[in-house]
Image (cartoon, helix red, strand yellow):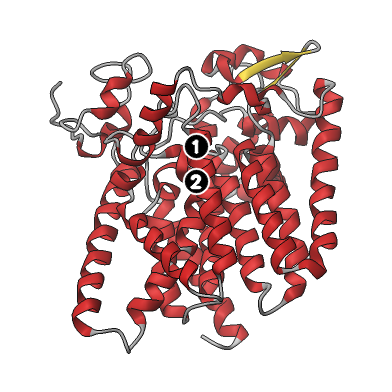
Amino acid sequence: MKSPKGRAWGCVAVFVAVTIVYECCPIKGAGDLFWSLPTVFSIIREGNTDLNEYQAGFHHYAGAVEKIDGNYRNFFPMGSALVALGPIWAFNKAVNLVAPVARHIPKVGKGVANWQKNFERVGDIDASFFFTTEMVLASMLMGLAAVFIQLMASELLPWRWALVVTGAFAFCSSVWSTATRDMGQHGPSVLMLSIALWLLVRGRRVPGSVPWAGLFIGLSYVMRPTNSISVMLLSLLVLIRYRRYFLAYCAMGLLVAASFFLYNWSVYAAILPPYYRPERILPQSASLLLEALAGNLVSPGRGLFIYSPIFLLSFYGLYLSLRSTLFRVEAAVLGGILLLHWLIVSSFPHWWAGYSYGPRYMTDMTPYLCFLLIPVVEKLSAPSTEPVWKRGWVVAFVLLSGWSFFTHLRGSTSKEVVDWNGAPLDVDRHPERLWDFRDPAFLRTKNWRG
């Protein structure tokens, strides 16, 4: 797809197709950022980020609210609220604009009235309204992320083969079963990293793209603190690969950093909020760290390679990239990010991410894992590949993709797999359940009997 017009329509098709699939999936994730959208509503209505007007509704998720200098605020990062602010503001304006006409169309008028009522509602809010809004918005954001993965992959592969990488991103990873299920940290984080990765890959052809990557890499840290690893190592990549543009890249990142630190100082009298403090990731013991390292990869409850075995091939792609001269530096940097991220998320005392599904803490790494699939797809699509070798790898790719698709389909469409966290025992109190191969979450059915 060489023409700009054709690529534009291709991007629209990717966005629409992926978003429709996501929107059709009914399962709401057990996310931490329930108060992100009420924060957005508060910003639009009152011009502030506090949640004081919602005090009567704190019973929905009291643990996600903190009191700072007499004001109640969302304990979790503000990044999700920032990403949602523009779409919610625009949608609310559009609803108010069509409201006079909508009153004469019963079904439309009912929807408009429901939105206006819940937008203005304070106190004990209707949680189901926010759940629905979260999933709609999160699905659209991940549809947009899929477009940037497609653009990134198509810089290195023909468009139709790039769709294979995009398919792995959209339907064979926790992007589907986690990032589209609520407006948590992971979706906005994945979106920022997907855009940044596309800009850096595009930089080989259009070097002027590189400084803009600094903006989105900086924003990825605002979305989720573990992206500090990406900030450091991707900046090193820019210094090595695009030295001429490094200062401009840094300037873009500093715009984000300055705004972030100034906001934190105004609220917390510190440049970082409590959620970002490094002592939160100290492991309780060496044995727990070793268990977490293994669990985040191969446990039946949270293992990346159990839920998304397609990404086993990403490490073959890493090997192929390190052997080539074209993307050796990129491969080394991304391999370093994956390694350090795995170590960091395994350092959390609750390494299994509480009530969640699959490898939630590894969700943010999906763009990098998909980038490392590109040399594998390129090798499979090459006409010079030996037929016997190629057939074997194609079969492996299809089988691993099929299993990955199945597990994440279950996570986004089955209530039973989400209920696994609490039945027959609370997983937070009985984390040994994470290693029960007889009862993996993705195999739970309505007929299950504990």
* Position in image of residue 365 (x %, y %): 50, 49
Relative to residue 43, is residue 408 drawn left or right? Answer: left
* Viewer-proximal residue among 449 and 348: 348
Relative to residue 119, is residue 174 drawn left or right? Answer: left
Q: Which residue is mark 1?
A: 343
Q: Looking at the image, is 317 positioned above or below residue 41?
A: below
- The answer to which quarter of the image holds residue 286 is top left
Spatial distance from mark 2 to mark 1, Cα to Cα? 6 Å
Circles 2 and 1 in contact, beta carbons < 8 Å: yes
- The answer to which quarter of the image holds residue 12 is bottom right
Amino acid type of the residue tagged 1 in the rendering: Leu
One can see residue 403 in this view: yes
Q: Residue at x 23, y 34 (%)?
A: 440
Q: Residue at x 33, y 20 (%)?
A: 431
Q: Residue at x 71, y 41 (%)?
A: 82
Q: Residue at x 39, y 64 (%)?
A: 167
Relative to residue 32, is residue 353 drawn left or right? Answer: left
* Viewer-proximal residue among 282 and 434: 282
Q: Which residue is mark 2?
A: 339
**Judging from the image, what secondary structure is the residue with disc 2 in?**
helix
- How many residues crowd mark 2 within 10 Å: few (<14), some (14–19), many (20+)? few
- How many residues crowd mark 1 within 10 Å: few (<14), some (14–19), many (20+)? some
One can see residue 88 in this view: no
**Judging from the image, what secondary structure is the residue with disc 1 in?**
helix
